[in-house]
Amino acid sequence: MIIMENCLYTKEHEWVRVDLDTVLIGITDYAQHAMGEIVYVELPEDDAAYEQGEVFGVVESVKAASDIYMPLSGTVIKVNTELEDDPGLINSDPYQNWIVGVKLNDSKQLDGLMNAVEYEQFCNSIDSN
Amino acid sequence: MHPYLPHTKQDVKDMLKVIGVNSIEQLFDDIPESIRFQGELSLQDSLSELEVSAAISSLAAQNRGTDQLACFLGAGAYDHYIPSIVRHIAGRSEFYTAYTPYQPEVSQGSLQVIFEYQTMISELTGLPVANASHYDGATACAEAAFMAQSSTRRKNIIVSQTVNPQTRKVLKTYLKFKGLNLIEVAENNGSTDVEQMKAAIDRDTAAVIMQSPNFLGIIEDIAEIEQAVHAEKGLLILSVDPISLAILKSPGELGADIAVGEGQSLGNTLSFGGPYLGFIATTKKLMRKLPGRIAGQTVDANDKRGFVLTMQAREQHIRRARATSNITSNQALNALMAAAYLVTMGKQGLVEVASLCVKKAHYTARQIARLPGYSLLFDKPFFKEFAVQGKVEIPELNDKLLQADILGGYDLSQEYPQYPNSMLLCVTEKRTKAEIDKLVSEMEGAL
Amino acid sequence: MIEYNKLIFELSQPTRQAYMLPPCDVQMEEAAELLPEKFLRQQAPALPEVSELDAVRHFTLLSNKNYGIDTGFYPLGSCTMKYNPKINENLASMPGFTSLHPLQPEETVQGALKIMYELQNILAEISGMARVSLQPAAGSQGELTGLMIIKAYHQQCGQGHRSKIIIPDSAHGTNPASVSMTGYQAVEIKSNAQGTVDLAELKAVLDSDTAGLMLTNPNTLGLFEQDIVEIARLVHECGGLLYYDGANMNANLGITRPGDMGFDIVHYNLHKTFSTPHGGGGPGSGPVGVVDKLVEFLPMPWVVIKDGKYVLDSSAAQSIGSVKSFYGNFGILVRAYVYLLTMGGNGLKRVSELAVLNSNYMKERLKKHYRLPFDHVCKHEFVLAGIGPNEHDITTLDIAKRLIDYGYHPPTIYFPLIVDSALMIEPTETENKETLDGFIDALIAIAHEAIEDPEKLKTAPHCTPVSRLDEVKAARDLVLKYTNS
């Protein structure tokens, strides 16, 4: 399982990476592995505003459908439309292939996310359950 | 021994021994005594095939159907010609004794049929994606309303009163429990009141539901309503008669986002109201909101073409509480009959059927309009159904027609009290000139 | 026989036809002149153009690629793939039934209405309900109808705030989906170590917001919910209703009735318990029965006797309305009625006894070779948990696909969700011991192959028209119809 040092994480297995004044959001290697081969990603509209914890998209494999939750409140400023034609990109590199870019409402919310070490511990704890 | 129960006494004994119990009764020891059924079900004892056949045949003989009566009744269920091969194909037990195609390697027959059915429904409706069918036309329409709600995140569904009353009743039930609003827009002289419809459409409108040809037989002019609903970013759901689509503009051409309809006309018997099939087709944009089964083409491990159920992440067995619909399967056998019908009639045949309906219905309308005491209720374009008003009570007229072996029209005053002494007549390609002329003369005689 | 791999569209030749209609016998203008041009389609739909024999042969060859009950053993759990009697088909196909228009005058359909009336009563008797509506088109729609009745009842009692429907985690996926469709919220409770409803879990979620509980008994593990009387008491005590998912009724006929267990609403799957064919995925039929206090909420119409005649009655003021056009899937109702006459009351009880015998026999013989998570006496079905972790990563899917090579339809797999690698097996009563033994021997042989020849499982099936299909490709490169390219 790959966990990137330069990302923050949620319990729903999204990653967040700060990129200048915005954040990029994707799903983790753990999540893509659990889903299996991803066949479809439902993307949000540009400019859509979300509260922290709201569902903003869906990833689907042939056996599962999983909501993607907004890790932080903000407004979508870019959407990775490449995933529409090639959703498998998430399987091949989940950290390179972000899903949305978001302008944050409150960067303090970043403090509530897990760092790489904490996320690894979290994944280990659910696996041992 | 009963012919469906193969266990010999020796079998039962051997099996009990393997299980390690002495009697079958012991296998039910886990059921608390207080809820064990005491005594015997008040049903008669089992009957032989000869006895059952005699009993059921005598019940069938108490009915007088369209095999004995010349049928001029439509109103949502239609007496069209069904080619002989349809029943033979649907009677192949490899089709009818199969379950829904969960194991594609042993279900390629069913899956390919669904794929071909989807292709033909898409072709008829002029919309790119069709599902594998739904319970019937009315429930397909209700599911389309849910699709619209899910896609627009709005709660108001507007329906014209020219939509089949059966469909509107089902819509009312489905929408009420889901917490959506159903707004009815009145009809005006046989078609939707366009001004009232335009006034009803607003930013809360998830969809407008129209039917064409509508319940009263009239071909609706959709154009203005289509523009109005799309201007407010709502959807247009169009309910259509699949036979009419051979010659009438398709929902796709008319700008509909979702087409639905009752597919019974396509090779399915009237069967006292069911089983029928509903069809649903939509745009690429909305396809992931489609309910129910969808078959897709793929390849096997040897790169050979094959078919599977696809986009399954939409469905209840994966999405459970978050699925847009709870439907588990489709009306596969009815869809097979529809597919066999469409293949048999083919490109020319369906056009011929539709043209015959138009010509014979117009002939009948003209003959009746000539009678003193009857007039056509509406002067608008119609397909195979039209309404007539007479100086007679419709139930009495229908009684008289029945005595002449004619199944008369639908009494419109049941659902449209504004049209007393009026009935909706349907003329399909099956009606002969002799039958039509007899209808006309009996109607004349009833005055 | 050579392999057939054509789509009907690939057989099409312009001007070929499989039909012949009589010439138009009325003197009229052409349709294009009778209708305004703006309504007309410019191009006829591109339907196939083939001869009659082409059409017959095409569909016949496709049917050869299907597996049905008439082809072989079909032990799909919770689907009750029992024999579909031929007399059902013959009698339901009589023109006296198939040619009836649903809006015909009642005096012309007395035989049809009598069948519906009798069937309503027999189904009520079997489940211990007061009244049955035949309208719902399928089990899933029966469920939806049942939930609507629950909601309508609470609203009428001034309890419209009740928002929760409790469902065990072993439930069919339709249960939570139906709950959402009626605007309710599904609350899932965990099963206990015995695989049945955990009373403590249930008590913890029951409150004044509870609208009802959905349960099938025997449950999807094939286990009888022995605490059902207490469960019913607890749910009723807090004002909720109990809904019985009739998918597993085949274990109960003449033995125990949902009404006596305390259920308020029942749906029946005529295409499971009552032998009507599954049709490759429909049409089914899902009548709904209710106890006395809920009768007025049933969907309308139903058949009653009035002045010695059978009539359709739509007068119940509190009815939830129509859930479907007309009166139900009549053609299926006729088949179920024929089956009930053929089996009789005595035969029905034997049906359940033998269904349970077959299931327990298979379970006993298989439990030494496959993991059995709940080793109790089972009812009409049971669930194995695959072969467990193994050296070659052989999965339940591999086992299922290999069963096809042995000539059997695989059981339901990966369901219920609470059992890892589940194989859910329901033999039904119509299968003989030799068939069961053959299937058991095949499963045992496959368990050995998993160790000795794993490749054979991973590449199975080998003797089907196609080998394993690429579902990922199907879902990624959606091809949902034929296009001429």
Image: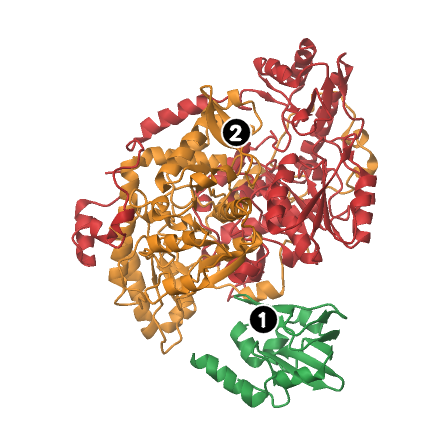
Chain colours: A green, B red, C orange
The dot on residue C313 is 2
Q: How many marks?
A: 2
Does dot 1 land on a helix, a strand or a loop?
Answer: strand
Residue B373 placement: quadrant: top right
Measured as percent of width and height from the top left, residue C457 is found at 39, 68
C468 or B161, nearer to the observer = B161
Q: Residues within 10 Å of mark 1 (few under 14, many from 20)?
A: many
Q: What residue appears at the point 76 percent right and 43 percent down from the top-left corner?
A: C43
- Left or right, B166 with respect to A20, comes to left
**Is A5 placed above or below B184 here?**
below
Residue C273 placement: quadrant: top left
- Can residue A62 be seen here? The reply is yes
Looking at the rendering, in which quadrant would you find the C terminus of chain C? bottom right
Measured as percent of width and height from the top left, residue B296 is found at 58, 57
Measured as percent of width and height from the top left, residue B264 is found at 59, 37
Q: What residue appears at the point 49 percent right and 34 percent down from the top-left corner?
A: C330
Q: What residue is pinned by disc 1?
A: A38
Residue C412 placement: quadrant: bottom left
Q: Residues within 10 Å of mark 2 (few under 14, many from 20)?
A: few
B274 or C296, nearer to the observer = C296
- Left or right, C323 with respect to B158, comes to left
Does dot 2 land on a helix, a strand or a loop?
Answer: strand
- The chain identifier of the residue carrying mark 2 reads C
The dot on residue B318 is none
